Image (cartoon, rainbow, N blue to C red):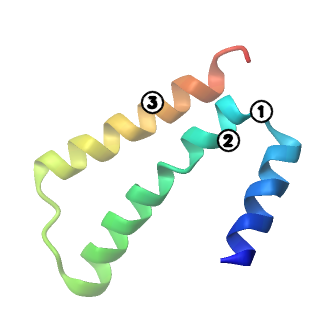
């Protein structure tokens, strides 16, 4: 838990919150992919579409001027 707080403070010291916070949603992508690879959970089209939406959203937020 302390490690997460340290990483978060480090991220905020290097990037604005408007860019750093959306990056947290990358965890949903990692979680879905690991569940697929490690546990054989199905990765339906709706999940893939959701992952795509997250990637596009994070990309757009990080490319826009702060």
Classed neighbour count for the residue bearing mark 3: other residues with Cα under 10 Å, few (<14), some (14–19), many (≥20):
some
The image shows a total of numbered marks equal to: 3
Residue 37 image position (x, y, % from top left): 30, 79
Q: Nearer the viewer, mark 3 or mark 2?
A: 2
- Marks 3 and 2, the one that precedes in the sequence: 2
- Mark 3 sits on what residue? 57
Alpha-carbon span between mark 1 and mark 2: 6 Å
**What's the mark number on residue 40?**
none
User: Compared with residue 63, is residue 7 higher up or lower down, i.e. above or below?
Assistant: below
**What's the mark number on residue 16?**
1
Quadrant position of residue 34:
bottom left
Residue found at x 73% / y 57%: 8
Residue found at x 39% / y 57%: 28
Work out which quarter of the rendered image holds the C terminus and state it: top right
- Mark 2 sits on what residue? 20
Lateral position of residue 1 relative to residue 38, left or right: right
Residue 31 image position (x, y, % from top left): 38, 67
Judged from this view, the residue extending furthest toward the top is 65
- Marks 3 and 1, the one that precedes in the sequence: 1
Classed neighbour count for the residue bearing mark 1: other residues with Cα under 10 Å, few (<14), some (14–19), many (≥20):
few
Lateral position of residue 52 relative to residue 24, left or right: left
């Amino acid at each position: 838990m302390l490690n997460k707080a340290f990483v978060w403070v480090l991220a905020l010291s290097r990037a604005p919150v408007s860019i750093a916070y959306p990056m947290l949603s990358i965890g949903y992508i990692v979680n879905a992919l690991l569940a697929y690879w490690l546990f054989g959970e199905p990765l339906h089209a709706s999940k893939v579409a959701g992952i795509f939406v997250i990637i596009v959203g994070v990309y757009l937020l990080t490319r826009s001027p702060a």
